[in-house]
Image (spheres, grey):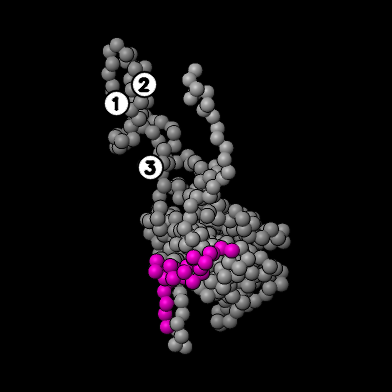
Amino acid sequence: MKNSDRNKGFVFKQYEEPFQTPFDKLFEIFKELITYTSGDFDEAIDWLRQLDKEFKLTTPEYTIDDFIADLKNKGYIVERIGVSGDGEVDISSKMEKALRQNALDQIFGKMRKGKSGNHKTKYSGQSDENTGDFRSYQYGDSLDKISVTESLKNAQINHGIGDFSLSENDLVVEDTQFKSQMSTVLMIDISHSMILYGEDRITPAKKVAMALSELILTRYPKDSLDVIVFGNDAWPIAIKDLPYLQVGPFHTNTVAGVQLALDILRRKRHANKQIFMITDGKPSCLNMPDGTYYKNPMGLDPFITTKCYSMAAQARKLGIPITTFMITSDPYLQEFVDEFTASNRGKAYYTGLGNLGEMIFEDYEDNRKKRIR
């Protein structure tokens, strides 16, 4: 045996981090900070300076001021004249896209490392995703879907090797999963409880919305995603405005949110439609016919919950499932969510903040597969 073969084996050495420029290192931190500050550049930079003092993130050769200059030169921030006449710094559309991509990498990247997301359906059709199953060739099947290996094997079995021939009956094609276009409305609760009790629930919800929007824009451009927020009222927000999303001194008007979502989906031409609702609390508000609000934050008010169940049933009649992601584990509220879900025949998840993104992504991918009614 040669010496070179005997010397082969494993080499252990100290881990070395992949090389990052000083800008890249600070940029990763800055993207997190600007998300938590809802797009407030000055506050994010103040936090970055505090972290720099504690953890020595910069060097005399590359300071925070150098980083700010690079952000400007690379087009991530823009300077504007404010109402008072003073200069103000805002994040640019390029930065907004970078935040969506960062959220997508954080959520979808974790999914790809695991086994999640592998959903199967009993319905098949034309697509690029193979199921691993084979069936007989049918007139109209695309030629590029024919499995040459399996077809030749059939020909040898049916006709023998000596007198080889290949007929249409020998041909098999690899089946694929059929996926159709999807219209999704993502409802995000922005009531005050989303930041109560020392827990920031709005930032994870905001990250999920940014990630889901970037996934659809880049991977499923024919799908549509509308994002609406609901507190005392409900209103749509643009995808580009997601980084700036904040909670307000609001109650929770679930009925207004579902009603707006249904109005949006009625105008969509896609066959598949769905509503995702992220909330942490019970419904506590309704719009009254005279323009006033009926509010009751104490317990589950039957007057409010009955209206919620009615809206869920209306969505069911329209063939629009509602998937509720309840980011608290209050057993008292599960009764309402269970009844709401039963009225719609939808789905409900009682989840913490840590796996919210993965669950929504899995559900979105699963629901894109054509539903046969």
Q: Tag 1 or tag 2, which sits nearer the N-term?
A: 2
- Which mark, by number, is residue 238? none
Q: Tag 2 or tag 3, which sits nearer the N-term?
A: 3
Q: Is residue 273 visible?
A: no
- In this figure, which residue is indicated by the disc labeled 1? 168
Nearer the viewer's eye, disc 1 or disc 3?
A: 3
Describe residue 284's horizontal placement relative to residue 88 as left or right.
Answer: right
Question: Image point 67% across, 70% down: which residue?
Answer: 196
Q: Which residues are magenta?
A: 56-81
Picture coordinates of residue 116, whole percent (x, y): 54, 45
Question: Image point 51% across, 63% down: which residue?
Answer: 26
Front in this rendered view, residue 128 or 245: 245
Say which amino acid is labelled 3: Asp
Task: Assign a secondary structure to mark 1.
Answer: helix
Picture coordinates of residue 236, whole percent (x, y): 47, 70
Describe residue 91's horizontal placement relative to residue 167 as left or right.
Answer: right
- In this figure, which residue is indicated by the disc labeled 3? 128
Question: Image point 29% across, 26% down: which residue?
Answer: 168
Name the outermost residue toward the top: 162
Q: Tag 3 or tag 1, which sits nearer the N-term?
A: 3
How packed mark 3 is, by other alpha carbons closer than 10 Å (few <14, some 14-19, many 20 or more), is: few
Picture layout, residue 323 above or below residue 246:
above
